[in-house]
Amino acid sequence: MNGSISISTQENSRICPVLCIVVPCFNEEAALEETAACLEACLSHLELKGNIAASSSIIFIDDGSTDATWKSIEAISRHSSRVQGIRLAHNSGHQNALLAGLEYADADAVITIDADLQDDVGAISKMVAAYCEGAEVVYGVRDCRDTDTRFKRITAQGFYHCMRFLGVNVIFNHADFRLMSRRAITALLRYPEVNIFLRAMVPMLGFHSAIVTYSRSRRLVGESKYTPLRMLSFALTGITSFSLRPLRLITIVGFVVAAMAALVGLWAGVAALTGSASTPGWASLLLVISFLGGAQLFAIGVVGEYVGRIYLETKRRPRYEVEAFSGVAYNKVKLDRLRE
Ligand code: UDP
Ligand code: MG
């Protein structure tokens, strides 16, 4: 009997799911009002068409902003029963803010989208349709990168190629605009790591997925929170969390260099014995020594990246800390969890 109830509930959730949109925000005061209005209009439209349940909602995660973002979220959630807010106690990073939203969202399906609305809100209905047809994960994939700066385009594409080369399964031109079903979220939340890279973690789950392509617009207000240094750190987290190939490559390179050194040593020995050795040039010697010194430092650095992340993992620090909630419809169970 229980089984039949759960099956029919599941079927209902595929027909008219409760949808939650999770929006991470870090110093996004300039964008919030318009973003909230746009997402609310989108939910109302989908609800009117009977595509999602009336209790569908939006959660803004304030990732420790230092501007008026939280005040704005509080004001918006006061006026709209659909909108809830969670303020993290400090800036925990985009990925952790997304994870907080996924953990707190009480819905059949959750869509994550950036606060600057660069991602196309129009694609949300297609994502819901794909979910209703059975997809557990729906990836928003950019159809082109025309709106990126040259620097961003080259580094981003290089990164995707690099990840593929290192054997990591990432969806090309997909960032964090995606829909996840309750089942996929439950599976994701079983991953306990603190170095989070959702773009590779979600494909790793391996559920039935679909792709929705969309055009990404330019950021209209505020500025990108991903400085080149942050992008580099994010890329390193992605690589070191999912691939051991850099370590293997170092081993192979070390082996090849050692083999070459042995061959050169053999040649030098033969040359000395046959008396054909000429005075070696100091420049080439210096070049080889400094090259090998640099290569060794690089190799130590790569190993250090892994060791550093092991260090972070072993500490098991919480991935984020919640400071406050806002919004009338807030789920009591979760508030109780906070008080524990
Ligand atoms: N973000 C966040 N915490 C951070 C950095 C960014 O929650 O530490 C949010 C940000 O407010 C935005 C999303 O993550 O909603 C993506 O950031 P951004 O638009 O700056 O990235 P870009 O589109 O330039 O890659
Ligand atoms: Mg953006």
Image (cartoon, rainbow, N blue to C red):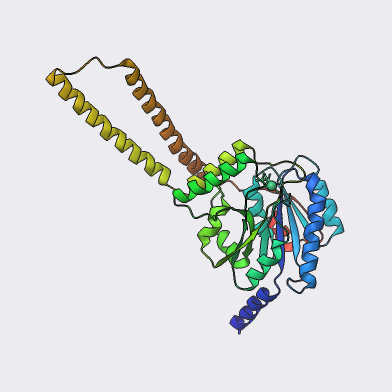
Report the quarter where the C terminus lies: bottom right
Question: Residue drawn at (85%, 56%), measured in percent from left and top?
Answer: 78
In the rendered image, residue 83, in percent from the top left (x then y), is placed at: 79, 59
Residue 12 lies, in percent from the top left, at 68, 77
The answer to whether 6 is drawn above or below residue 67 in the figure is below
In this view, which residue lies farthest toward the right?
A: 79
- Residue 73, can we see it? no
Instruction: Please tell me whether residue 211 is drawn above or below residue 307 in the rendered image.
Output: below
Q: Position of residue 197 (x, y in %)?
A: 56, 50
For the residue pair 285 and 314, the one nearer the viewer reads as: 285
Instruction: Using residue 294 as the reference point, say whether residue 158 is left or right of it.
Output: right
* Direction from residue 172 to residue 216 in the image, left or right: right
**For the image shown, how many numbered marks are present on the structure?**
0
- State the residue in front, 82 or 155: 155
Q: Is residue 291 visible?
A: yes
- The answer to which quarter of the image holds residue 22 is bottom right
Residue closest to the far left: 274
Quadrant position of residue 281? top left
Quadrant containing the N terminus is bottom right
Who's the residue at 61% across and 39% down the image?
Answer: 151
Q: Is residue 147 above or below residue 140?
A: above
Where residue 268 sits: x, y (%)?
20, 23
Picture residue at 62% right of the left edge, 56% below the top: 143
